[in-house]
Image (spheres, rainbow, N blue to C red):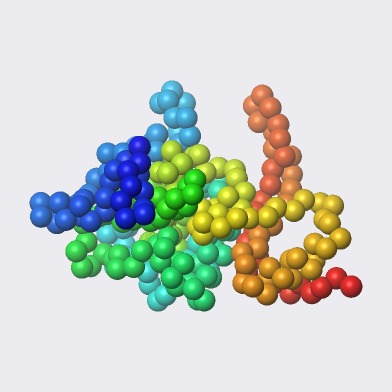
Amino acid sequence: MLSSQDSVWYLYEQVYEDIRNECLASNVLFTDDQFRAEPASFYRNYDGMKPRPRLEWLRPGEITDSPKFISDGISRFDTVQGTVGNCWFVSALTNFARLQENDHRMFAQVVPDEQNFEENYAGIFRFRFWQYGQWVEVVVDDQLPTSSGVLASLKSSDDNEFWAPLLEKAYAKLSGSYGALSGGLGSEAYVDFTGTISELYRQPFPEEFYQRLSAAHDTNAFIGCIYEVGFLQLSNSSGRFFYSYGILYSGVKDKK
């Protein structure tokens, strides 16, 4: 369910400022009843019948002594894939983190400023994604899935930094669960991060492909790729298995 206000839609009618102020006034940390800290939020189509690895949902302050939303700036090294099969999302987020170096305004559209674990901390964070022609704001509490005290979700190379795993949680909430993020195309995430369009090329590439790729690189466009790494055999079916990459610095030249 979405509601609109000031050109932004609010998922489940959860407005960040209202919830944070209520939590601060009551001296409690936000607990999200729309995306609970439970197996169904992590595992896709969870019914409680099949045994799953045990998860413990912890707040950053329970994982490290000095949690930071952003530590020493944004870097492409802030995104390290966890146990979720969402390399397509992580590769796109890596490219998006690089955007911070050139266009903070666009980055701040998805990751609003002035979020931290110090001033007015209430255990709530917010992110925005482009959905069906509109920016949608998603709030989450900061309880993150862990196994043996280690994040089971996306993590940063800096153990004290949490903007990336919290953004992934918001995207998982928007999608229904972390498990729903298993398998996808980076181009989907690029659209959700920017509100722009994407182009997808498949082999064999058109004759002008390298010129287009070079032009995209020159305009600082996001560029990613996927490739087949094997054949995935399941219990009663099989399929191709792909891996995604974000191309951060391309050496592409026009093909003569």
How far across and down, in percent of the image, does residue 82 sit?
A: 50, 52
| Near-viewer residue (126 or 234) | 126
Q: Position of residue 212 (x, y in %)?
A: 75, 65
Q: Position of residue 236 (x, y in %)?
A: 66, 24
Q: Is residue 20 left or right of residue 169?
A: left
**Image point (45%, 63%), residue name:** 156
- Quarter of the image for residue 51 reads top left
Residue 146's place in the image compared with 61, above or below, is above
The one nearer the camera, 131 or 31, is 131
Quadrant including the N terminus: top left
Looking at the picture, tell me which residue is in the foreground, 101 or 52. Answer: 101
Q: How many marks?
A: 0
Q: Is residue 145 left or right of residue 121?
A: right
User: Taking the image as drawn, is residue 57 in sight?
Assistant: no
Q: Quadrant of the C terminus?
A: bottom right
Q: Which quadrant of the structure image shows residue 161?
A: bottom left
Q: Residue at x 24, y 45 (%)?
A: 31
Task: Indicate the position of residue 221 as horizontal and vertical percent values.
Answer: 62, 67
Residue 225 appearing in the image = yes
Q: Residue furthest front?
A: 6
Q: Would you place residue 33 above or below residue 119 in this image?
A: above
Q: Is residue 103 above or below residue 121?
A: below
